Image (cartoon, rainbow, N blue to C red):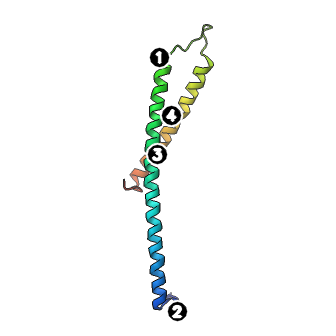
Amino acid sequence: MSFGSDLQGWQSHEALLGVQDYEINLLENVRKCMIHRAKCDREYIAALSSAIGTITQKLANSNYDTPTGQASFIHKYANGILMVTVRIVIRLLYGCRICRDHAILAC
């Protein structure tokens, strides 16, 4: 297998080097974007964890029972939101661990 005869001149060499420079710049931009995304994910996880802690504390300190002895609709709704949020945080943490373990991000 040989290299194309029309790509063996000096101009072709310069063009290939230019393409290589653009590819390097693209990879640098992708790396910066991924680092920024990981930072935003960490901040999002921290905010969700804080919200979960606040909701859990408020639910623990409140009275679950209404005068009829049944859990109120608001408490059931808040508990459902809490469970979904916990699942989101667990998935985000799992994704962050995968990125860290595979050394995709150097942060």
The crowd level at tag 4 (other Cα within 10 Å; few <14, some 14-19, many 20+) is some
Which of the two discs, 4 and 2, labels the residue nearer the N terminus? 2
Residue at the extreme top of the image, as rendered: 67
What x and y, as percent, mark residue 18? Answer: 46, 79
Q: Nearer the viewer, mark 1 or mark 4?
A: 1
Amino acid marked by disc 3: Asp
Instruction: Give the number of the mark in front: 3 or 4.
Output: 3
Instruction: Please tell me the numbered disc located at residue 61.
Output: 1
Mark 3 and mark 4 lie on one chain; the one further toward the N terminus is: 3
Tell me the element at label 2: helix
Q: According to the image, label 3 marks what residue?
A: 41
Residue 17, how many percent across, how many down?
44, 80
Residue 97 sits above or below residue 14 on the image: above
Measured in 3D between alpha carbons, the distance from the residue under mark 3 to the one under mark 4, in whole angstroms, is: 15 Å
User: How much space separates mark 1 and mark 4, taking CA atoms?
Assistant: 19 Å
Q: Which residue is mark 2?
A: 5
Image point (43%, 64%), residue name: 28
Element carrying mark 4: helix
- Do the numbered discs 4 and 2 sit on residues whose CB atoms are within 8 Å? no
- At x 48%, y 83%, the residue is 15
- Dot 1 or dot 3, earlier in sequence: 3
| Nearer the camera: disc 2 or disc 3 | 3
Secondary structure state at the residue bearing disc 1: helix
Please report the residue visible at 46 percent of the width from the left and 44 percent of the height from the top: 94
Dot placed on the residue nearer the N-terminal end, 2 or 3: 2
